[in-house]
Image (tube, helix red, strand yellow):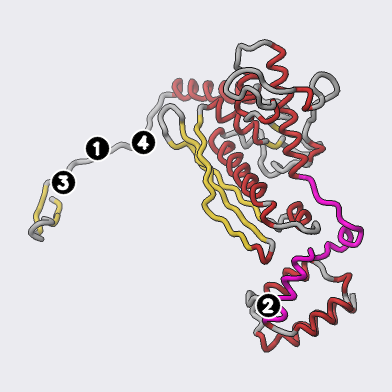
């Protein structure tokens, strides 16, 4: 018997417990059934892998153990396995004063036919990653110019993570190198449509009048691989995919031109210097900071900025009373190289 409470009277009553069937295993299969399942699994894996194209769906860096899965490849695998994709940005931080932004995305994959959850993946990005930090060193660069790029990168990373988890293909592909340098991405070779402008605009369907390179990757993949359109149209779609992938890689790798001093010492962006101007005036001594800037103009590195911002904003264990000792030690260290 089991005791329960009558929610209307508050009286404790006894009810008959419902018997629960016992089993040692949730799913019992025979050896033949297990072998059949494994055979189907292997067949599906092989079929998926055979449809992947190097330079479009995955990239290969000489000397690495595995190819890295790219966004078009992740989208293709989702279509192949019948997964719906839902990506949300669950955490973000934007601080214009520090020229800093952070995004964290979660991607959920479900079966299109049933809505059953399959797997989820996570991805994050922040503006202090090397390639974005260099872009922010450009004169007049602003964190708001990078927000869309950063959020898209976090979304892409979470998608690739989710796809590798759902498909079980992490033994074939890796996500650790998904930010491949442009040199590792195959670009359209000489010949028809080597220039993206040669592709022109699409003259049919819901995207009629749009440039081929502006079409969604999923739509281009469908035209190139699944449609019954003529061969020339399929070639256009395939070339447009190659151009889109190469362009995305170029944008991710692109860094602004910097003068020789900035390249060699990774100097602060002017807005970072202005940020320290404000913090010293508010929390310590503007005269000290102005003298330091004049004396050590070639030592105003980003690493120094990050240390001193944390200090002046109270993010370290050093109390304001100990600032003088800390700065004396820093100046001595810098002066002595």
Q: Main secondary structure of the magenta part?
A: helix
Q: Which residue is mark 1?
A: 21
As drawn, is 162 to the left or to the right of 148?
left
The extreme front residue here reads 209
The answer to whether residue 108 is left or right of residue 284 is: left
Do residues under tags 4 and 1 come within 8 Å of each other at their CB atoms?
A: no
Q: Mark 2: which secondary structure?
A: helix
Q: Nearer the viewer, residue 177 or 156?
A: 156
Closer mark to the observer between disc 3 and disc 4 = 3
Mark 3 touching mark 4, by CB under 8 A? no
Give the quarter of the image for residue 60: top right
Across and down, in percent, residue 139 comes to 80, 58
Q: Residues within 10 Å of mark 1 (few under 14, many from 20)?
A: few
Q: Which residue is mark 2?
A: 312
- Specify the segment rendered in magenta: 253-282
Instruction: Compute the Cα span from label 1 to label 2.
Output: 65 Å
Where does the image place residue 170, in percent across and percent down from the top left? 62, 37
Asked whether the residues under the numbered discs 1 and 2 touch, taking CB atoms below 8 Å apart as contact, a structural biologist would say no
Mark with earlier residue (3, 2)? 3
Work out how far the residue at label 4 is from the one at label 1, CA to CA, in angstroms.
12 Å
Quick one: label 4, few (<14), some, or many (20+) residues within 10 Å? few
Q: Quadrant of the C terminus?
A: bottom right
Front position in the image: 115 or 22: 115
Q: Choose the circle earlier in sequence order: 3 or 4.
A: 3
Q: Which residue, given by chain and number where applicable, does mark 3 sit on?
A: 17
Q: Secondary structure at mark 1?
A: loop
């Amino acid at each position: 018997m089991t005791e329960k409470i009558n929610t209307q009277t508050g009286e404790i009553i006894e009810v008959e417990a419902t018997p629960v069937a016992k089993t040692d295993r949730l799913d019992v299969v025979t050896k033949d059934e297990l072998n059949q399942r494994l055979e189907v699994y292997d067949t599906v894996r092989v079929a998926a892998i055979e449809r992947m194209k190097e330079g479009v769906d995955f990239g290969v860096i000489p000397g690495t153990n595995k190819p890295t899965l790219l966004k078009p490849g992740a989208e293709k695998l989702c279509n192949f396995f019948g997964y719906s994709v839902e990506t949300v940005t669950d955490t973000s931080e934007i601080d214009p004063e520090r020229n800093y932004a952070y995004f964290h995305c979660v991607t959920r994959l479900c079966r299109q036919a049933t809505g059953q959850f399959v797997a989820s993946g996570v991805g994050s990005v922040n503006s202090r990653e090397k390639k974005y930090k260099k872009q922010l060193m450009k004169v007049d660069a602003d964190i708001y110019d990078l927000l869309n790029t950063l959020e898209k990168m976090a979304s892409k990373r979470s998608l690739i993570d989710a796809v590798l988890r759902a498909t079980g293909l992490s033994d074939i592909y890796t996500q650790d190198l998904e930010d491949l340098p442009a040199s590792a991405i195959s670009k359209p070779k000489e010949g028809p449509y080597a220039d993206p402008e040669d592709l022109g605009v699409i003259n049919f369907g819901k995207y009629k009048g749009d440039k081929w390179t502006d079409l969604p990757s999923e739509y281009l993949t469908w035209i190139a691989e699944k449609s019954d359109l003529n061969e020339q149209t399929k070639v256009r779609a395939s070339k447009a995919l190659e151009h889109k992938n190469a362009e995305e890689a170029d944008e991710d790798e692109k860094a602004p031109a910097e003068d020789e001093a900035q390249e060699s010492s990774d100097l602060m962006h002017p807005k970072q210097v202005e940020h320290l101007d404000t913090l010293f005036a508010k929390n310590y001594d503007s005269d000290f900071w102005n003298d330091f800037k004049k004396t050590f103009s070639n030592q105003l590195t980003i690493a120094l900025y990050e240390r001193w911002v944390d200090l002046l904003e109270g993010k370290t264990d050093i109390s304001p009373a100990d600032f003088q000792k800390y700065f004396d030690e820093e100046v001595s260290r810098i002066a002595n190289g």
